Amino acid sequence: MNEAYNNIITRRSIRNFTGEIVSKEIIDLILEAGLAAPSAVNKQPWEILVVEDREILDTIANLEGFYTKMTKKASAAIVVCGNTEKTLPGLAQIYWVQDTSAMTENILLASHALGIGAVWTGVYPSVDRVKKVSELLDLPSHIIPLNIIPIGVISNENTFAKEIDKSCIHYGKWTK
Ligand SMILES: Cc1cc2nc3c(=O)[nH]c(=O)nc-3n(C[C@H](O)[C@H](O)[C@H](O)COP(=O)(O)O)c2cc1C
């Protein structure tokens, strides 16, 4: 099977990390893959924060109303944000959500390709979560956190299988 295709098919959310450090070189490669994502009119309306400070990572792990406990043993957390000052105008502004989601998937796939564990943990559109992350990371109001992606060295605790459900595929017009 083609290697790139296989990487897409075998990606899984990883929530168990050893606590070991992921090198800056690897993180840079992961971020570069994120920045290669498509965006509407190529606006690239995004910002990335890389959090490596242990105290902040521990705070993220314990944030109330979040599912981010795995951050306790993560090496870093990548916070993918939209920048509303770089977006398309008017109604098209909301494209930042798709753009940063595409970036996120690139980050997840690149992490997987490089043997690093990663998981998308949702922030936006929860008003409460956006507020908490913005306060924690001193984000100005035009920077909106889409998610937090804890990354780390994979612990061998991970055993999982996922079935691909093809029942949602429809050919041609909708049929019941
Ligand atoms: C928008 C979004 C929000 C998510 N939020 C969380 C989260 O807060 N915590 C978490 O552990 N996983 C979160 N996930 C990961 C999903 O649980 C995971 O992708 C799903 O169970 C499918 O598993 P897989 O990624 O291994 O294919 C989120 C995924 C998406 C796309």
Image (cartoon, rainbow, N blue to C red):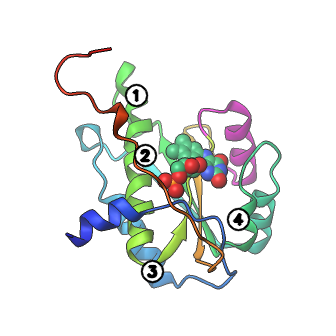
Task: Check disc 2: other Cα within 10 Å, few if <14, some if 14-19, many if 20+.
Answer: many
Task: Report the amino acid beneath label 3.
Answer: Ile
First in sequence: mark 3 vs mark 1? 3
Task: Check disc 3: other Cα within 10 Å, few if <14, some if 14-19, many if 20+.
Answer: some
First in sequence: mark 3 vs mark 2? 3
- Whether 130 is among the magenta residues is yes
**Above or below 97: residue 64:** below
- Quarter of the image holding residue 130? top right
Who is closer to the viewer here, 91 or 86? 91
Q: Is 23 displayed left or right of 100 in the figure? A: right
First in sequence: mark 4 vs mark 3? 3
**Above or below 6: residue 167:** above
Q: Identify which residue is drawn at 40% across, 42% down.
A: 165
Q: CA distance from mark 2 to mark 4?
A: 21 Å
First in sequence: mark 4 vs mark 1? 4
Q: Identify which residue is drawn at 24% across, 72% down.
A: 3
Q: Percent from the top left, x then y, of residue 95?
A: 38, 32
Task: Report the amino acid beneath label 1.
Answer: Gln
Residue placed under numbered mark 2 in the picture: 100
Discs 3, 1 touching: Cβ within 8 Å: no
- Whether 32 is among the magenta residues is no
Q: CA distance from mark 3 to mark 1?
A: 32 Å
Q: Is 78 displayed left or right of 63 in the figure? A: left
First in sequence: mark 1 vs mark 2? 1
Who is closer to the viewer here, 134 or 171? 171
Q: CA distance from mark 3 to mark 2?
A: 20 Å
For residue 93, the mark is 1
Residue placed under numbered mark 3 in the picture: 26
Q: Percent from the top left, x then y, of residue 26?
A: 45, 80
Residue placed under numbered mark 4 in the picture: 71
Discs 3, 2 touching: Cβ within 8 Å: no
